Amino acid sequence: MAITSFYQRDFPTLVLDEKYILREQSLEDTEAFFKYYADPEVCRYILAMIPTNLSEAETEIQYCQNLFKSRQGIFWTIARRDTNQMIGAVGMYMNNFHHRAEISYDMDKQYWGRGIMGRAIRMVCRYAFEQMEVTRIEAVTLKENTQSIRLLKKNGFHYEGMMRNYKYFKGRAFDIEMFSAVPKTKS
């Protein structure tokens, strides 16, 4: 399936394991998203506006929903299967022309260290390579975000180097570390 035809299908729900699923984000996720995303430790290395109230959190959820509808990307909620409660998110901003994506992720701190995000990243990457014909997935992070760097390396991403002044946020340019993953070649 080509990227262009991928967006014509229904939003895919992916079963991560017996406890968690990856599903489309919904407005019902707003409160859970706002609660965990506002934690200073969760958003410490995120170079994006952090919602300061529920209305701003709802706007962010709608933005992520609209990425799929406008064929610019796809973002899943990581949800508990027993309660359907959002505990995190993982998704990709797409460059459809070049079959390339940039992966992003975040998670409620109380779920850190359980391997959930690693499994979600692997599943999303496999889905992108096999179902969307993505040929490259990029991940960018700040050098100081050693947990994210470790997570990326553990899940098949390769370090490509430092990109100077790559992200601009709050009146300042930031250097980032660039990682990438490509589909495994069949021999």
Image: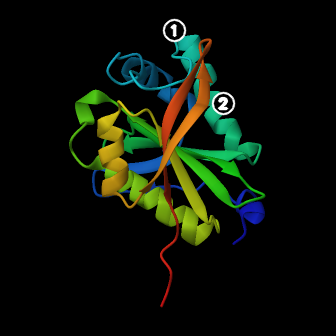
The N terminus: image quadrant: bottom right
Tell me which amino acid carries mark 1: Asn
The answer to whether residue 117 shows anywhere in this view is: no
95 vs 158, left or right, is right
Residue at 30% across / 56% down in the picture?
154
Where does the image place residue 158, in percent across and percent down from the top left? 42, 58
Say how many tags the image has.
2
* Residue labelled with disc 1: 53
Tell me which amino acid carries mark 2: Tyr
151 vs 61, left or right, is left
Which picture quadrant has residue 43? Answer: top left
Q: Furthest residue to the left?
A: 113
* Mark 2 surroundings: few (<14), some (14-19) or many (≥20) residues within 10 A: some
Where does the image place residue 104, in percent across and percent down from the top left? 50, 41
Which picture quadrant has residue 62? Answer: top right
The answer to whether residue 149 shows anywhere in this view is: yes
Where does the image place residue 81, in percent across and percent down from the top left? 34, 47
Is residue 108 depicted above or below 114 in this figure? Answer: above
Chain-order first, disc 2 or disc 1? 1
Question: Does the residue at mark 2 contact the one at mark 1 (Cβ under 8 Å)?
Answer: no
19 vs 135, left or right, is left
As rendered, which of 152 and 114 lies closer to the eye? 152
Q: Secondary structure at mark 2?
A: helix
Which disc, if any, is residue 63?
Answer: 2
Mark 2 to mark 1 CA distance (whole Å)? 16 Å
Residue at 35% across / 17% down in the picture?
39
As rendered, which of 134 and 21 lies closer to the eye? 134
Is residue 113 depicted above or below 45 in this figure? Answer: below
